[in-house]
């Protein structure tokens, strides 16, 4: 069992312009490629959805007592059991939550700030390990496995960021 505890509830959630504010990340690492000519390969960590098929990126509500980057790092720990360094902002993505329609956000609209997170540590235990499984995938496999179109877009922007930054 993890000593860390996941935050729950919506009483600390941030809202702006009728949208629930969400923070998340694209956790990634480098793996040495078997092909000696290829060098390193980027792998993205995705987690299972607890409510249906397909894989997700770690994300969740941005709360009043934290910065957006702190929220993204917290979600990576809670949902995916990884720690690392935020390297860059990838983008804001709008989506409609089917499950979280509430008084402050009756239409279920959300805006997710997504960040590239370079993974330095994979935790043996984490808050949501009983309901989440982790999968390391290539960026193209991650795009194909995504449950939500907005996450596919974030992964595509991440792939462009990798090329632009020449992070490999």
Image (cartoon, rainbow, N blue to C red):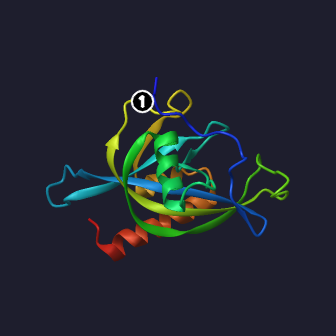
54 up-or-down from 105: above or below = above
Q: Is residue 97 left or right of residue 34?
A: right
The extreme bottom residue here reads 164
Q: Quadrant of residue 116?
A: bottom left
Whether 44 is drawn above or below 82: the answer is below
Q: Which residue is disc 1 drawn over?
A: 125
* Quadrant of the rendering where the C terminus is positioned: bottom left
Question: Residue at the front extreme?
Answer: 65
Q: Estimate how packed mark 1 is, as few (under 14), some (14 to 19) or many (20 or more) residues with alpha carbons within 10 Å.
A: some
Residue 32 in view (yes/no): yes
Please state which of residues 10 and 114 is positioned toward the viewer in this rendering. 10
- Asked whether residue 143 appears in the rendered view, the answer is no
Query: Secondary structure under badge 1?
Result: loop
Q: Nearer the viewer, residue 41 or 154?
A: 154
- Indicate left or right for 77 with 62 as reference: left
Image point 82% across, 51% down: which residue? 102
Residue 42: x and y in percent read 32, 56
Most extreme residue toward the left, as rendered? 36
At 62% from the left and 40% from the top, the residue drawn is 53
Picture quadrant where residue 111 is located: bottom right
Residue 154, x across and y down, in percent: 53, 64
Relative side of 102 to 118, left or right? right
Residue 15: x %, y % from top left: 72, 61
């Amino acid at each position: 069992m993890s000593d860390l505890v996941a935050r729950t509830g919506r009483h600390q959630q941030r809202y702006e312009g009728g949208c629930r504010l969400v923070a998340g990340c694209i956790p990634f690492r480098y793996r040495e490629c078997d092909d000696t000519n290829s060098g390193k390969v980027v792998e993205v960590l995705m987690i299972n959805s607890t409510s249906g098929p397909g894989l997700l990126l770690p994300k969740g509500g941005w709360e009043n007592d934290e910065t957006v980057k702190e929220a993204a790092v917290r979600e990576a720990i809670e949902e995916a059991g990884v720690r690392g360094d935020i390297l860059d902002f990838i983008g804001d993505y709008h989506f409609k939550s089917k499950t979280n329609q509430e008084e402050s956000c009756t239409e279920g609209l959300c805006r997710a700030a997504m960040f590239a997170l370079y993974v330095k540590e994979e935790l043996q235990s984490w808050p949501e390990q009983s309901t989440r499984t982790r999968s390391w995938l290539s960026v193209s496999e991650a795009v194909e496995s995504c449950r939500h179109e907005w996450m596919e877009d974030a992964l595509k922007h991440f792939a462009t960021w990798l090329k632009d930054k020449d992070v490999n």
